[in-house]
Amino acid sequence: MPLLRGSRSAPSEEDRRLLREALARLDPWTFWSVPLGGTGADFAVVGTTGAFAIAICPLEGYAEPGRRGLSVSGIEITGFKEATRAARKIHGQLLEASTFAHVEPMLCLTRALAGSSRTIRGVRVVRLEDVATDIGGRARTLDPTTAKRGAEALGRPIASSSGPRPEVEDV
C-alpha cells in the first residue's frame, strides 16, 4: 500500500493497534470494524452512519495540505487513488451483501500533528483522535442489522473493547 513516497510504505503493528483502539470507541451495537489485508486500505468500518475504508499514514511530524495533496514533514503523501479504489472495491462487496451504502475513503494520521479533518482529493484526512467522532457523528443511513451483514461480508469483524456484542436479530 504505497501511501507515502520516500519512506516505509506499510504501517507498523503499533499503528494498527492505535487505530484499532480508536475504532473501539465506536458504539459496539451499531459499528463493525474489519481489518483488511489488501492494498489501499487497512480497515473497513460499516455502521449505521455508513461505510468507510481507512488507510493508515504512519509518518511523524506536522501535516500540511499543499497544491497537490498532503505532506508530512516535507514528505509528500501519495496513494489517494489507491484509497479511492479500495473504497470502490468495498462498495462492490457491500452491494453483493445487499448493503447499500456509499463507502468513504479515509486517511488516518496515526502519528502526525494536523489541524481539523478535511477532504483532500476525495479522501477524508483525519487525526487518530478524531476517527471515532468523524465516523460516529454523521447522519444515520443504515439499520444495525444491515450494517452487521455488510461488515461480515467483508471479513471477520474485530471484537470491541467494551465487551461482547449483542446478537442482532435478522428481520
Image (tube, helix red, strand yellow):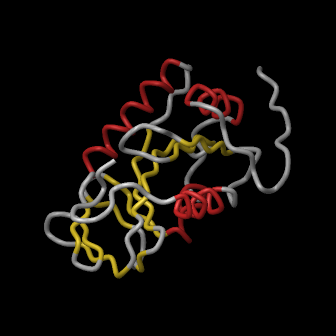
Quadrant location of residue 48?
A: top right
Q: Residue at x 25, y 68 (%)?
A: 70
Quadrant location of residue 67?
A: bottom left
Numbered marks: total:
0
Relative to 91, is 23 above or below? below
Quadrant location of residue 41?
A: top left
Q: Residue at x 42, y 69 (%)?
A: 117
Q: Residue furthest left?
A: 67
Relative placement, left or right, of 21 versus 93 is: right
Q: Foreground: 77 or 143?
A: 77
Q: Residue at x 69, y 61 (%)?
A: 25
Where is residue 12 shown, x and y percent of the image?
48, 60
Where is residue 125 shown, x and y percent of the image?
38, 63
Where is residue 105 shown, x and y percent of the image?
39, 48
Q: Foreground: 117 or 110?
A: 110
Q: The C terminus appears in which quarter of the rendering?
A: top right
Relative placement, left or right, of 73 versus 30 is: left
Relative to 156, is 19 above or below? below
Q: Residue at x 59, y 64 (%)?
A: 18
Where is residue 86 shown, x and y percent of the image?
37, 38
Q: Foreground: 53 or 111?
A: 111
